[in-house]
Amino acid sequence: MLRGVPVRIALIAPKNTPQERAWLASYFPFGVEEYRRWRLYDAVIFWNLTDEVARIKSRANTLVCAVGVEPEWLWPRNYNPDFLRHCDFYSSYRNFADDRFQGAFHPFVYFADPAEKIRRVFRAAIAAERPNDFVVFARHDPNIRRRIGEALGGQKAVLVGRLFGHHVADKAAVQQSCRYEFITENVINDWYMTEKLPQSLMAGCVPVYYGCRRAGDVLDSSFFIDMHAFGNPEDPGVLDAVVRHCLAPGTYEAYFDQIRRTGEQVLTEKYSLEKTVVGPIAEFIQRQAANGFRPRRRRFWSR
């Protein structure tokens, strides 16, 4: 039910478990159900696009809202104009559609967590004791993660993940024991920026970041150390220079003070699930419902 109007909305999230889909659906201010192919929906929300988008549009003028979360190498449909043209609302790191797309585009910022969890975790993290200087998490090494581990040799550092042969049960607890977190994205370009940076801030770490080259356009650079500013971290000596900068007197205190004073506000206003995903999609669907939108079958025998 949406503002007194019966509206049926479904979620398609092929990469996620049923529990994860139910969790995501629960944050929308209206009922969102698991997608069933034979049902006619007023709106369908895609968390990563699939071939189903063309079939949905071929049978009815259902509203299609899509969020392109995964990188192109893993989920190419999120970046393919042949799929994006079917969307009525589309959110991604930047607009990859062509002129066939006639819908509404909303820039996507990868969320850290729901606002309530951000507040709870952040407040506990800010008060935490931090006996270690550095932490890095890595399952695999698409670029410089192993080199980071080598550069941190001899430091008060915690190296976690399959790459380093060290598993931990509670990532947040480890983050909260460290002052800095080294972060690298799987893809390095001008737009791809995942949840790693805001989740590090949420844990009270000062992020040392290598990824989106325009990260400073998304998040004020006073909150993190951008490794790009030191040169190519794959070149000899660059990572050592980054480590020296982190350990220089006053560096940590300046960044942490900024995070402590304004981090919660920035995270809840810019990186909460409600602000980045739920709000824009819900507002779009609500506007369409208020304008009297109802789906019509394109073929009477469609199921």
Image (cartoon, rainbow, N blue to C red):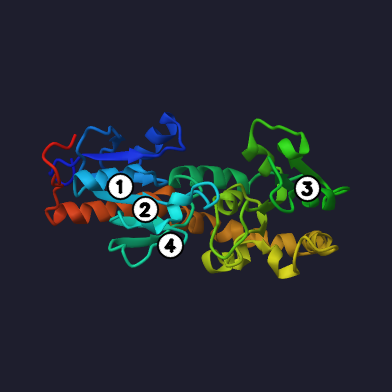
Q: Is residue 171 above or below residue 217?
A: above
| Residue situated in front as seen by the camera: 73 or 288 | 73
Crowd class of label 3 (few under 14; some 14 to 19; many from 20; radius 10 Å): some
Q: Earlier in the sequence, mark 1 or mark 4?
A: 1
The numbered disc on residue 83 is: 2
Q: Is residue 216 above or below residue 113?
A: below
The residues bearing labels 3 and 2 have C-alpha atoms spaced at a distance of: 37 Å
The residues bearing labels 3 and 4 have C-alpha atoms spaced at a distance of: 32 Å
The percent coordinates of residue 90 (x first, y second) are 35, 56
Residue at disc 3, secondary structure:
helix
Q: Earlier in the sequence, mark 1 or mark 2?
A: 1
Residue 108 placement, left or right of 121: left
Q: Nearer the viewer, mark 4 or mark 2?
A: 2
Instruction: Check whether the beta carbons of the residues at disc 1 and disc 2 lie within 8 A of each other.
Output: yes
Crowd class of label 2 (few under 14; some 14 to 19; many from 20; radius 10 Å): some
Q: Earlier in the sequence, mark 3 or mark 4?
A: 4
The percent coordinates of residue 238 (x first, y second) are 81, 64
Q: Which residue is mark 1?
A: 54
Q: Residue at x 73, y 46 (%)?
A: 135
The residues bearing labels 1 and 2 have C-alpha atoms spaced at a distance of: 7 Å
Instruction: Check whether the beta carbons of the residues at disc 3 and disc 2 lie within 8 A of each other.
Output: no
Q: Which residue is mark 3?
A: 146
Q: Which residue is mark 4?
A: 96
Q: Earlier in the sequence, mark 3 or mark 2?
A: 2
